Image: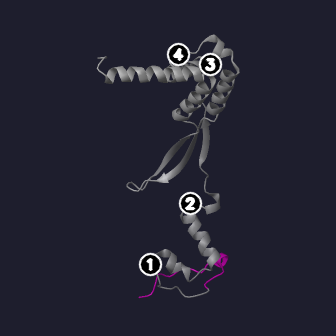
Amino acid sequence: MAGPKIPFKPEFGGFTEKPTNTGSGLYSLIGGLLDADELAYIRSLAVGGDESKKPKPDLSRSVYQYTPEQIDNDINNVAKKVLGREIVDADREAEWYQDLTKGLNKMFSKGTISETKLVRNKKTGKLEQVTTQIPQFTTEQKTAAITEAVTEADPEALERKRRLDFAGWMIGKMGGGQ
């Protein structure tokens, strides 16, 4: 059985070869009639445009502005856990504290990068907008930076806290505690 009759199109250079039956579908039918460039152009129209003109993923950055009070609260909480004491005004005026807050602000300014792209859902076959968020800092990184700074700033308080924790543990093990 012969294929369907395809009219002569001078803009495509006319018929150059007979249609082939090597594959299935329209592309294999017209593949023998058109040269490679013409076939690529038709395919690009069918899939929605040239590959080089596909939209790039959208990138955005979200930055949460931490207040000085929030940063002070975070530093104070870590100091209580690590050193067993609160941050006082003398600490807030010290160089290590100023350097720490600058470092934390720099970390926070990196924010979270969000990448948005269109992805075809495998189940429905429809295009969906998918946003992936990549945080540039984590709570663990923030806590580690604060811990390092407070332990370097007051090693005596750190040692005292360790001795008190050990003494409390020993009393509990020896039956002197509840």
Earlier residue among tags 2 and 4? 2
Labels 4 and 3 touching (C-beta < 8 A): no
Give the secondary structure at mark 1. loop
Q: Report crowding for label 3: few under 14, some 14 to 19, many 20 or more residues within 10 A (C-alpha).
A: few
Decide which of tag 1 and tag 4 comes sooner along the chain. Answer: 1
Instruction: From the image, state whether disc 1 or disc 4 is nearer to you.
Output: 4
- Figure check: 42 above or below 127: below
Residue 48 is marked as 2
Residue at the far right in the pictured view:
95
- Residue where numbered disc 3 is placed: 68
Question: Which stretch is magenta?
Answer: 1-15
State the SS at label 4: loop
- CA gap between label 2 and label 4 equals 64 Å
- Vertically, is 75 above or below 20? above
Which three-letter amino acid code belongs to the residue tagged 3? Pro
Q: Nearest the camera: 161 or 74?
A: 161
Task: Pinpoint residue 164: horizontal percent, then vertical percent.
Answer: 45, 19
Q: Are marks 3 and 2 in contact (CB under 8 Å)?
A: no
Which of the labelled discs sits on residue 24, or is there none? Answer: 1
The residue at the point 61 percent across, 62 percent down is 51
Q: Amino acid at mark 4?
A: Arg
- Assign the C terminus to one quadrant of the image: top left
Q: Give the CA separation, mark 2 to mark 1.
A: 21 Å
Q: CA distance from mark 3 to mark 2?
A: 51 Å
